[in-house]
Amino acid sequence: MSPLDPRLQEALDGERDPGELPADLREAYDRLIAAAHLVSATPHLSVASRVMAEIRHTAPAYHDGSVRRAVRWLGRPRAVTVRLRPVWTLALAAGLTAILLLPAGPGAGPRPGVAEGVANFVGHFPGARSVEVVGSFNDWRRGVLHLNDDDGDGVWHGAAVLPAGQHEYMFVVDGERWVPDPLAGRYVDDGFGAGQQNSLLIVRPAESSSP
Amino acid sequence: MVNDGAPDVEVVARILGGDGEAFGILIRRYEPGLLRFATRILGNPDAAADAVAESLVRAYRHLAQCRDPARLRSWLYRITGNRCRSHLARRHTNDISLSDAPPPALADNTDAWAALERGEQVALVERALAALPAEKREAFVLKHVEGMSYDEMAAVTGARIPTLKMRVHRAREALLAALEEVVR
């Protein structure tokens, strides 16, 4: 097997007019195009009814129970705790984002339930118009967990009471740019095969850190 | 009610808003290409149908995780490609067996001879495709059967464009060599 003439590769890549190819290369060009055409027929199959039957019996995208979940989330008492730490300052200086996972302490307002903890999200996004967090805990639903930057310094923060355990999440900046948390420390493949990763957080139950 | 010609972004928003039946629009739109793609990767229509069905159900369940609904096609191909790779891995080989290749379809009697001839040609190309390593086969199919740009192929496979170009170039060389071998 010998390498193909670069002119033939360019023509097949659409970077060169095949009409300019010499006769032997044009013949090879036509043969490859014809070969591709031969296997371009669409199979006489359909999985539509099977798929529709399946999804009618499974949880739809994120609307199943999402209203109830959103109401529950909105009505749930939550504690917001922001602690400044040297590492946090360093992270900001580096232009990175950080997430702090802190159990609610005594006097920090309404406590999470026994099997819940508080996740504080912090990210540095100077110039952003909006930042929100989507994740497995809110069915990747947009518009549920917005971060705030009240003083306009580019540091966005917010908190949520989450069930204890492992959650995947991403920041969504300006409603369109999905950004993993560079300081999450743990990441998992998003499962869709292109090597993209979600950030991973582990929420400890608030009760477990109580004295 | 969203119509069949609505842009993907609109259909996705409709589904995420609770209209699960609107997913049928996306199935009608992308099922043929996904089945063609999976059949060429797996070499077996039944396995391809399973892979595409599983991929579409997965896409529906995780639709909210589609980061850019305007590029839904790439996302669906990515999920399907991933599912095909899982199928191939379960077979412990990247190569598809010739017995898996779909048989040529014969038309009515008047066209039988032409169909047989075409069927033989199709089988020949399928045999040459089947002999390629899975990554090169996938790259060739995305480029020349699905007609994707290298940008879109990168979104589908997660591979870099120079890598994809190399795979396509190598696949062309191997295919052309295999076809010439038969002609001799």
Image (spheres, rainbow, N blue to C red):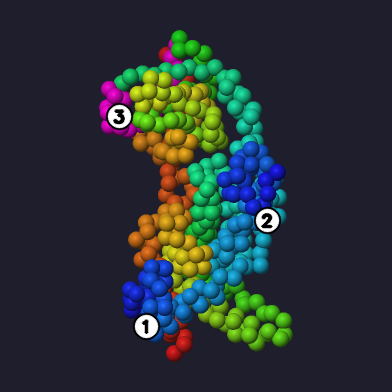
- Identity of the residue furthest to the top in this view: A107
Q: Nearer the viewer, residue A166 or B123?
A: B123
Where the N terminus of chain A falls, by quadrant?
Answer: bottom left
Of helix, strand and loop, which one carries label 3?
helix
Write down the region rendered in magenta.
Answer: A86-106
Mark earlier in primary sequence (3, 2): 2
Of helix, strand and loop, which one carries label 2?
helix
Mark earlier in primary sequence (2, 1): 1
x, y percent for residue B47: 59, 63
Of helix, strand and loop, which one carries label 1?
loop
Mark earlier in primary sequence (3, 1): 1
Circles 2 and 1 on the same chain? yes
Marked residue chain, label 1 = A
Q: Which residue is mark 1?
A: A22
Q: In this figure, what is the number of numbered marks? A: 3
| Mark identifier at residue A48 | 2
Q: Can you tell which of label 2 and label 1 is closer to the viewer?
A: 1
x, y percent for residue B54: 60, 53
Q: Which residue is mark 3?
A: A91
Q: Residue at x 37, y 75 (%)?
A: A8
Q: Nearer the viewer, residue A154 or A35?
A: A154
Residue A116 at least partly seen: yes
